[in-house]
Image (spheres, helix red, strand yellow):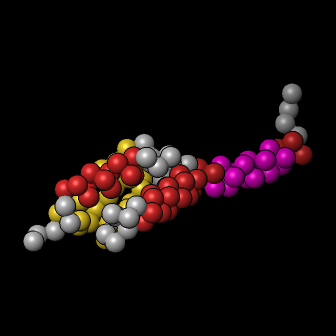
Amino acid sequence: MPITKTALSRLVLAVACAVPAIAITAGCSSTPTHESAGEYTSDAALTAKVKAALLADPGLKSLAVSVTTYRSEVLLSGFVNSPEQIQKAVTVTRGVEGVHSVKDDLHVKPQ
């Protein structure tokens, strides 16, 4: 069955439309080192929830703790006044729904 000029032009048009669509959606997927747009949004929301939980705790609300989230793994960093505050911050963070793990990079301020 020979390919007609019309069939060939339809095939070329279909391929021309498919290539940009594939390229655009491939840019939205995640890789081991980059988050997808959906993952980034979820992590930003999780960061906000952790910060709110830390601020809601009377013993932690005045601390300068930085919260960073990547793929539901939360990194706490900064300085606190005591080892007990480190444990409390980690415990509060683990209690936030959606947190898969917590990395602790908190340090006690030198006295």
Q: Is 13 contained in the magenta span?
A: yes
Is residue 73 toward the left or the right of residue 105 in the image? right
Q: Nearer the viewer, residue 21 or 77?
A: 77
Query: What residue is shown at x 69% (from left), y 52% (from top)?
Result: 21
Is residue 46 toward the left or the right of residue 61 in the image? right
Q: Position of residue 87 (x, y in %)?
A: 27, 51
Magenta part of the chain: 9-24
Q: Nearer the viewer, residue 6 or 101?
A: 101
Residue 23 against residue 108 in the figure, above or below: above
Please, what is the dominant secondary structure of the magenta stretch?
Answer: helix
Residue 36 seen in the figure: no
Specify the farthest residue to the left: 111
Residue 73 against residue 65 in the figure, above or below: above
Query: What residue is shown at x 31% (from left), y 69% (from top)?
Result: 63
Q: Nearer the viewer, residue 87 or 38?
A: 87
Image quarter of the C terminus: bottom left
Image quarter of the N terminus: top right
Q: Position of residue 51 (x, y in %)?
A: 44, 63
Q: Nearer the viewer, residue 51 or 46?
A: 51
Residue 15 seen in the figure: yes
Residue 41 against residue 61 in the figure, above or below: above
Q: Position of residue 4 (x, y in %)?
A: 88, 40
Q: Is 82 contained in the magenta span?
A: no
Specify the farthest residue to the top: 1
Query: What residue is shown at x 90% (from left), y 46% (from top)?
Result: 6
Is residue 71 toward the left or the right of residue 62 in the image? right
Q: How many marks?
A: 0
Q: Position of residue 49 (x, y in %)?
A: 50, 58
